[in-house]
Amino acid sequence: MRVAMIGTGYVGLVSGACFADFGHHVTCVDKAAEKIAALKRGEMPIYEPGLEALVAGNVRAGRLSFTTDLKEAVKTAQAIFIAVGTPSRRGDGHADLSYVYDAAREIAAALTGYAVVITKSTVPVGTGDEVERIIRETRPDAQFAVVSNPEFLREGAAIRDFKLPDRIVVGTDDERAKQVMNELYRPLYLNASPIITTDRRSAELIKYAANAFLATKITFINEIADLCEKVGADVQHVARGIGLDNRIGSKFLHAGAGYGGSCFPKDTVALIKTGQDHNAPLRIVETVAAVNDARKRAMARKVTAALGTSLRGKTIAVLGLTFKPNTDDMRDAPSIPLITALQDMGAKVRAYDPVGMDQAKSVLSDVTYCKDPYACAEQADALVIVTEWEQFRALDLDQLKSVMKSPVLVDLRNIYLPDEMVQRGFTYESVGRPGTKAD
Ligand SMILES: NC(=O)c1ccc[n+]([C@@H]2O[C@H](COP(=O)([O-])OP(=O)(O)OC[C@H]3O[C@@H](n4cnc5c(N)ncnc54)[C@H](O)[C@@H]3O)[C@@H](O)[C@H]2O)c1
């Protein structure tokens, strides 16, 4: 099948490359000419494990191409995906749908025969109706159906998630569109990935409800972690103890610095706005968003507690900047409010991230970037682990200690063991577990 993917960001590029790998002919379109030019040269605009090889293989096979010419790509496509951004609208937190609606207008103008227009972007319930209205208004003669097909891939594991999804959600009542969707996803269907076919509004809401639930789970365990610190319990034991209950499940029960990233913060806020607009307030999600917001900056207080003194004039080394490992995405990363808080308290910040430093430079100022964890720790009064990249799990603690001004480690991902850290001579502070002081 011929597919046009409008928007070649994380979701568009990964989905486009995976659909090509299934055997479809995919043209990825983006307005950003420099991004398309780079892709044509074989350079990836994002860091995502396995993506470069997947793209290269499918380009070589003639199934994947890149263009800025939306009209050309849409003209011959039977399936047209909208995978543009839906960031928070400045001022009120509603999803900014201007990119989606612009894309719908451009698609409408370029339609030739029957085509299915599929919204893969995360969009509030009812957006499909508006996309349909826009296309009909722009092109009363066009033959098309608008389908909701939200994407659940996680950055850092995006290709695996796309090819082995827990479920595929298809929102449409149109029989012809259902057939197109079945053909598109046939390889996954054969792998027994469940396809949930539902009405369009339910499909749109599934995506937000899923993200809000996961954000709630994270925030729940973070608050339990705070309680553990006060009462002398260990959140990792509590998380294991509840997670083994099948009704709860063990995933998303890792206490940390608060959720961030390109989806959870904006999607929870957008869902809250939808609830308010429809007089069905989502009080739990409202609380989750507020608790999480306060948490990220509050993590700076852990550094003060570990040092036992004011941060003025101190040097703090930060390991990990991206919102999670295996991505270079800095959107809404918890490291941003944390570093800003450290700086506000008078600290000088040094930082290291395996792939995120270029992106970080555009959102953080007055940070000294270093070439590796040990260079970062040099003369630091405290070291803070913010993102759990694999390479931070087995740091040479003796080497760290030898280069730091004082051996203080604040582990916001609980990747080290408190007892072991004290034996190794560190003052160690983590999340929801007993802190330890070096002798
Ligand atoms: N990033 C994720 O992990 C993830 C996961 C699931 C769902 N989503 C959702 O998918 C959508 C896209 O997210 P993303 O992270 O890929 O965004 P992104 O910002 O990385 O990419 C969006 C791309 O769309 C392009 N674009 C905008 N308008 C265009 C137009 N009219 N024509 C052509 N190109 C256009 C932009 O230039 C940009 O390259 C969002 O709604 C997001 O919430 C993202």
Image (tube, helix red, strand yellow):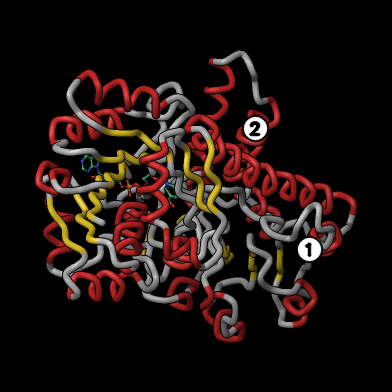
User: Mark 2 vs mark 1: which is more N-terminal?
Assistant: 1
Relative vertical location of residue 136 with respect to residue 39 in this rendering, above or below: above
Q: Look at the numbered disc 2 and give the secondary structure of its residue.
A: helix
In the rendered image, residue 261, in percent from the top left (x then y), is placed at 48, 49
Which residue is pictured at 51% across the width and 65% down the height?
164
Q: Look at the numbered disc 1 and give the secondary structure of its residue.
A: helix
Relative vertical location of residue 115 with respect to residue 281 in this rendering, above or below: below
Kind of residue sitting beneath label 2: Val
In the rendered image, residue 54, in percent from the top left (x then y), is placed at 31, 72
> Picture quarter containing residue 25?
bottom left
Which residue is pictured at 23% across the width and 38% down the height?
114
Using the image as rendered, state which of residue 75 and residue 396 is in the foreground. 75
Using the image as rendered, state which of residue 336 and residue 427 is in the foreground. 336
Which residue is pictured at 36% across the width and 29% down the height?
96
> Picture quarter containing residue 61?
bottom left
In the rendered image, residue 338, in percent from the top left (x then y), is placed at 53, 49
Q: Name the residue under label 1.
A: 236
Quadrant of ligand 1: it is top left
